[in-house]
Image (cartoon, rainbow, N blue to C red):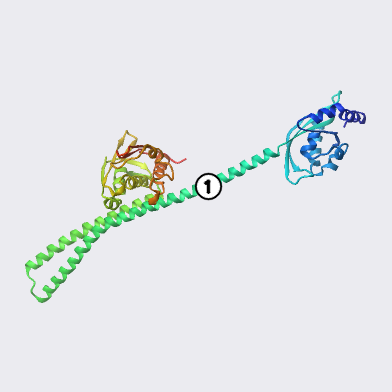
Amino acid sequence: MPSSSKASEVILFAQQPAVQQIYDTAPIGLACLSPDCRYLQINQRLTEICGISVEDHLGRFVRDCVPALADSVEAIVRSIMETGEPVIGVEVAGQRADQVEERHWVTYWHPLHAPSGEIVAVNVAAEEITERKRAERQVRDARDAAEAALRHLQETQASLIEAEKLAALGRMVAGIAHEVNSPVGIGLTVASMLQHKAAQFAAEAASGDLRRSSLNAFLDLVQDAASQLVNNLGRSAEQIQSFKQVALDQTQSNRRSFDASALTEQVLSHLTGDLKQHAITLDIQCERGLVMDSYPGPFGQALTHLVVNAMTHAFPDELDGTIDIRMVASGPDHVELLIADNGCGMAPEIKRLAFDPFFTTRRHCGATGLGLHIVYTIVTERLGGQLNLKSEPGGGTAVSLILPRTAPRPD
């Protein structure tokens, strides 16, 4: 603590007109505090930004003038008196006596030394940052609103993607119903005929008019009917088992080893009903023995979306056409899957946006614009592959997928 004579010298120095002029012309708020936290000097700018009047504060203790800040001010002054080190960048929030709005200041505290080196006062500089704080709050609120909107968009996109997956399964259900209906119908016809012939044979046997030729004819009929029933029921069982496996893959997305060519043919077999309805021919040529350690569900989803997209967009106005599916080895570690159609093709501006989410040229027909975006996400993120699109107006569209035989492990 400085001596009383030194403190008096500081007070007289701080109150000199020249010092007062320096204080009043400074662009920031300034105050000089004694070691016991009394106001020795206050400039006009501090009066403007903090509402501290010279008449009400000069010579009085901080605790009597600003009780809410007294503890913090006394702690800072005490630290400077003990260490001799300035305290920089202390932010203060409060209200002016004449205003309701909360205001903010950043303060800088420096010791004032006597010629002997003794700290005899503390100089305080205050800069108002209320507008900066308000701008930061507005930016923060805008960022929170943008993040909330992004979360909502992501949730909406996830819901639409799930709806697309269910729609793909719905197409598979329709396809399997079409494929199963034929062998089941044949089997039912054969079984009905066999039932009728069995009744006739029983009537002949009961009347005692049964001849060897009738017995041999009936046995031949039974053998032929049994063979047809086994074949057609076997086809139905294979189709149902195929559907169960594809549906399981697409709903669970488990990783396993599979024959890519066989899976391609298996997945596309469930789209034959839709293709026939649109008078579209599907030409599949796949190299055998392309074993992949990957995710068959996402693989099937991407393939289904590409074929359905071609079926929907490449052949408007119910035009017929052809979709070619080619799968070949691409080096020792990759396979190439090509889906090409001879449809209407894409204009350059449409091709540029083809994989963007929610972009579609057929929204009026119920399209969501997520089909090709889902394909791009699956191929690049889940399967670890690359995708290339080629299309020209009137020249059809070709989508090439280069997929690693061993998909990357998730992080």
Q: For the view shown, which residue lies furthest in the bottom direction?
A: 207
Q: Quadrant of residue 360?
A: top left
Quadrant location, the N terminus: top right
Local packing at callout 1 (Cα closer than 10 Å; few below 14, some 14-19, many 20+) is few
Q: Position of residue 296 (x, y in %)?
A: 36, 46
Q: For the view shown, which residue lies furthest in the right direction?
A: 5
- In the depicted structure, whether residue 226 falls above or below residue 58: below
Q: Secondary structure at mark 1?
A: helix
- In the depicted structure, whether residue 249 falls above or below residue 384: below
User: In the image, 318: left or right of 194?
Assistant: right
- Nearest the camera: 132 or 398? 132
Q: Which residue is mark 1?
A: 151
Q: Residue at x 55, y 44 (%)?
A: 147
Q: Quadrant of residue 102?
A: top right
- In the depicted structure, whether residue 254 falls above or below residue 80: below
Q: Position of residue 222 (x, y in %)?
A: 15, 63
Residue 131, visible in the rendered structure: yes
Residue type at tag 1: Arg
Q: Position of residue 248 (x, y in %)?
A: 37, 52
